[in-house]
Amino acid sequence: MDQPVVAFDWMRMFLGDAPPLFLVEIVFRIGVIWLWTLALLRWIGGRSIAQLSLTEFLLVIALGSAVGDSLFYPDVPLVHAMLVVFGIVCLDKLVDVVIRRWTKVKAVIDGQPHEVLHNGQILNDGLNIHRIGAFELMEMLRMKGVMNLASVSHAYIEPSGQLSAFPAQQPGLGLPIVPPPELGTVPPGDGQNCCCSCGLLRDDPGRCPACGAIRQTPATQAKQWNG
């Protein structure tokens, strides 16, 4: 019958039931697994380290579990853990080869880019695929130095989750995003207005035909953005 747990048993909390020499074994285990994992990650190459796609994210989770269990569980042999780590890395390497050779497989595994802005107007279909809102996209554009949506001709959410944007050759009227529209907008005037949510140029009241929003603000002349 198991012994009842004694609360605030300092020996159990800090050292457990293992002999003191097991602490030295833990240090040895760390060294072996660290060197083994480092060698395998170097073998994978730069692609997996430079960006965290879906497959690389799964690789990190799997490696974390395999490596972590082998460091301090005395009943997990090092060879078993090293074999698991090797198998995970080999699987990732195989997936990398497959997606390099077959474009359709890459689209299924890694995903594909989606256009989220076209000629100064936000495309809600692209945003919905990546489950982000218009204001989040505006934040990402501001971090790239964009002050007006009309300064951008095309913007894409890449499979890695990063935003790529391209400057407009001849910027026109568009939605100013500095200061952020969510902080308050200027009431629409008699001139050209635009939707506060997607940037669609409009001159009629009511809901935006593109995104369904109601708020409008005067459109401003966009400046050239160098990207």
Image (tube, rainbow, N blue to C red):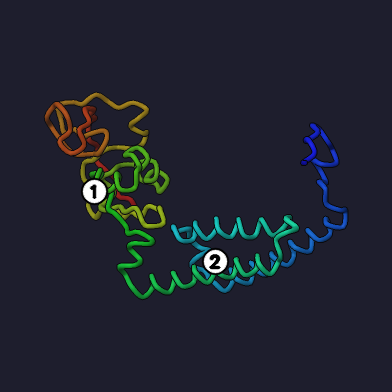
Task: Name the residue rendered at 18%, 39% in the picture.
Answer: 210
Q: Earlier in the sequence, mark 2 or mark 1?
A: 2
Q: Residue at x 79, y 64 (%)?
A: 28
121 relative to 57, above or below: above
Q: CA distance from mark 2 to mark 1?
A: 49 Å
| Residue occupying image coordinates x 30% and y 42% | 148
Q: Secondary structure at mark 1?
A: loop
Q: Position of residue 170 (x, y in %)?
A: 22, 52
Q: Residue furthest left?
A: 204
Q: Quadrant of residue 103?
A: bottom left
Say if mark 2 contacts mark 1, CB within 8 Å. no
Q: Amino acid at mark 1?
A: Pro
Residue in front for this viewpoint, 200 or 24: 24
Classify 10 Å Cα crowding around label 1: few (below 14), some (14-19), many (20 and above).
many
Q: Position of residue 40 (x, y in %)?
A: 60, 71
Residue 64 location (% of width, % of height): 60, 56
* Placement of 37 over or under 224, stated as above or below: below
Q: Which mark is residue 171?
A: 1
What's the mark number on residue 88?
2
Query: Residue 128 shows which numbered tag?
Result: none
- Residue 60 in sight in this render: yes
Task: Report the residue that reaches farthest toward the front.
Answer: 1
- Helix, strand or loop at label 2? It is helix
* Quadrant for the N terminus in the image: top right
Residue 226 appearing in the image? no
The image quadrant of residue 222 is: top left
What residue is drawn where x is 22% and y is 31%?
A: 213
Q: Seen in the image, is 209 located left or right of residue 75? A: left
Question: Where residue 182 appears, x then y in whole percent?
Answer: 35, 30
Category of crowding for the residue at label 2, using alpha-carbon neighbours closer than 10 angstroms: few (below 14), some (14–19), many (at least 20): some
At label 2, which amino acid type do we have? Ile
